[in-house]
Image (tube, grey):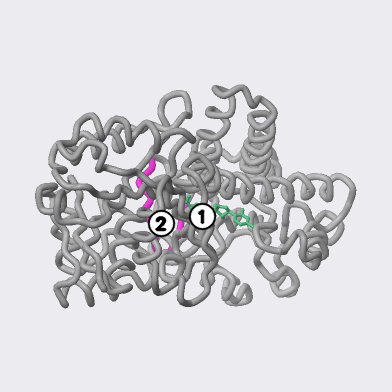
Amino acid sequence: MPLNIAVIGTNYLGAAHAAGMAEFGHRVIGVDIDPRRVEVLNAGRSTIFERDLEPMLARHTASGRLRFTTDYTQIADWADVHFVCVGTPAGPDGSADLAQVTAVADTLAPLLTRPTLLAGKSTVPVGTAVWLQERMRALAPAGDGVEVMWNPEFLREAYAVQDTLHPDRIVLGVQSGRALTTMRHVYAIPISEDVPVIECDLATAELIKTAANAFLAMKISFVNAMAQMCEVAGGDVVKLADALGHDKRIGREFLNAGLGFGGGCLPKDIRALAQRADQLGVSELTHLIEAVEDINQAQRREVASLAVSTLGGDVAGKRVAVLGAAFKPGTDDIRNSPALEVATSLADQGALVRVYDPQATVDREGIEQCASIVEALDGADLVLHLTEWQEFRQLDPAALDGVVRQKVLIDGRLKLHRPTWQRAGWKVIQLGRASTW
Ligand code: UGA
């Protein structure tokens, strides 16, 4: 039996979730305050570059099972479950800014006259669900009939559809059997496919999400710290990561050394967790996260200074080609992009920086965006590989003869096939692979 599902906030997470809910057979209305986004989504188009999302949006908007609106009255007493998918950006001190969550509560609650379930998907500081329920019950005509549960989201950009339809696990932070039954109904399809379900309290559900992102960030910073060790001691971090990865308790994923993590989630979420831990007196966790952040920032500085030293200590007037601008491949998202931070740092020091990215648009002073790899590389004194798009891995370095001025490459993602580039006469520098330069 399909349910009536409202999805509030239809940017990345919300758009994928709304389309996914329709794919699971439910009737879905997405709500957003941005009329332009609503218009685009209602036309079955995506507002972001995300593989597979647009066909799913198109299919379900065409069938009538999915539509979008700016009007909360259309969902208030209609929905069996209201999913909250709005953003929780970093506030001035790094803690999560809950203004959008508050706005949803204050707009929706006064319209709720019958009992309903509000399911939070946004990444929030622990304690938010309880606070939200109190606020909504005070404002809603339905009063205590409004119940809040937490159902955190783990989808990755570039894999949003796959992660929505086939999640690794479903976390249901609930206060009642009624909420649990409803949510098991919502996710009947993935549950029938044996996706593990973790039933827990609200605080645990909120913490699971931030813990997952913090752990991933910690893995990356750990391998990057080992890359620094390899650098000074003469080791090879790729071989080290491969060897660690064979240990099933460790696993190879998220052990790719290089420029480190960026994006709209990991950096912001771990900062917010550090702040919350500090507020609650768990200073050990705050210190751990600070160390993870420090290592991550150091990688960006290290690659930028390696570029400077490779160019003889002064980049002013030198041509630097940068391959990649998105924070990772498969997305056009440049939020907190390590690649762009390095590019910007070199441009600020006077380098003539030209960037090529297959999807991301760069609008930064001092950085010229190019329409092709060859255009970016034309006359370059140095090439930086900073986002590991497939297109770059498939490059034939022999075909670049006569394009660049100097055949020098810094592979900030350790993903290019070094012997192939070396055979074509390139000097290849990969952080953490000192032994095999
Ligand atoms: C991350 C999490 O992976 C998702 O599970 C989570 O749902 C999401 O945040 C969120 O909170 O919304 P995402 O931001 O799409 O997803 O990015 P990741 O795939 O985690 O990559 C983050 C960064 O780490 C990228 O800059 C990537 O280049 C970098 N990275 C990743 C490494 O430097 N090394 C690795 O081995 C893996």
Task: Tell me where residue 428 appears, x and y as whole percent.
Answer: 72, 61
Disc 1 marks a residue whose amino acid type is: Glu
In front: 351, or 154? 154
The residue under the point 65% across, 58% down is 254
Tag 1 secondary structure: strand
**CB of mark 1 near ligand 1 (< 8 Å):** no
- The disc placed on residue 180 is 2
Judge left or right: residue 306 versus residue 176.
right
Judge left or right: residue 102 versus residue 281.
left
- The disc placed on residue 55 is none
Whether residue 169 appears in magenta in the rendering, the answer is no
Judge left or right: residue 308 versus residue 37.
right
Query: Seen from this angle, which residue lies furthest right?
Result: 233
- The disc placed on residue 199 is 1
Judge left or right: residue 160 versus residue 303.
left
The residue under the point 25% across, 66% down is 3
Task: Tell me where residue 62 appears, x and y as whole percent.
Answer: 15, 76
Quadrant, the N terminus: bottom left
Q: Which residues are magenta?
A: 354-364
Assess disc 2: are there few (<14), some (14-19) or many (≥20) residues with their C-alpha within 10 Å of its C-alpha.
some
Q: What is the spatial separation of the Cα atoms under label 2 and label 1, in whole angstroms?
A: 8 Å
